[in-house]
Amino acid sequence: MSILQEFKEFAIKGNMIDLAVGVIIGGAFSKITDSLVKDIFMPFISWIVGGDVDFSQWFIVLGDNPNNLTSLADLKAAGVNVLSYGSFLTILINFLLLAWIVFLMVKGINRLRRIHANKEEPKKADEKPAPEPEDIKLLREIRDQLKTKNS
């Protein structure tokens, strides 16, 4: 088998296609979550913290600031050593929200699976088993007769 044929079989396997669909949906879902954090949750968090707060502008200057710059962009352009923890906080909140949403989705899917599994439960012990098919009965009779003739 040639390498191209092997690659073709690999690429069209169901698992590979499922993975590709998952990555594409994950990318779109990431954009939704980013918007949820940026446009919905961050304004509420900023309001709770106390005013119009842009977390991306939260930083600590770790060195000399000879020109007394106050903007993060200006400090970085001047080469001042800056710990910009606000961006990290935004990304951390984004991650926690994404993890929470995925957890809720998995929990919901597992609940649906349990409901579906309960619908397909095997028959209860007190119910009578299904009657034995005629052909099985006939084959058993033939087997028993052959045993008695050979004895």
Image (spheres, rainbow, N blue to C red):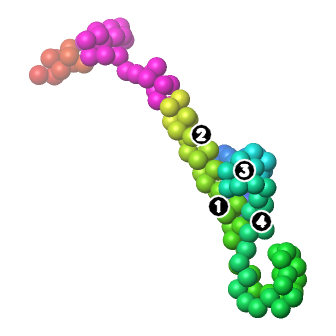
Judging depth in this view, the residue of 115 and 66 nearest the camera is: 66
Near mark 2 (Cα within 10 A), the count class, few <14, some 14-19 or many ≥20, is few
| Residue 92's disc number | 1
Which portion, as a residue range, is magenta? 113-141
| Residue 56's disc number | 4
Label 1, secondary structure: give it.
Answer: helix
Instruction: Pick whichever of labels 3 and 4 is earlier in the sequence.
Output: 3
Label 2, secondary structure: give it.
Answer: helix
Left-right relation of 103 to 56: left
Kindly tell me whether residue 13 is visible in this rendering.
Answer: no
Label 4, secondary structure: give it.
Answer: helix
Determine the CA span between mark 1 and mark 3.
18 Å
**Numbered disc in front, either 3 or 4:** 3
Which residue: 75% across, 86% down? 81
Determine the CA span between mark 3 and mark 4.
15 Å
Which residue: 20% across, 16% down? 144
Residue at which label 3 appears: 47
Near mark 4 (Cα within 10 A), the count class, few <14, some 14-19 or many ≥20, is some
**Numbered disc in front, either 1 or 3:** 3
Residue type, mark 3 in image? Trp
The answer to the question of whether label 3 and label 4 lie on touching residues, with beta carbons closer than 8 A, is no
Kindly tell me whether residue 38 is visible in this rendering.
Answer: yes
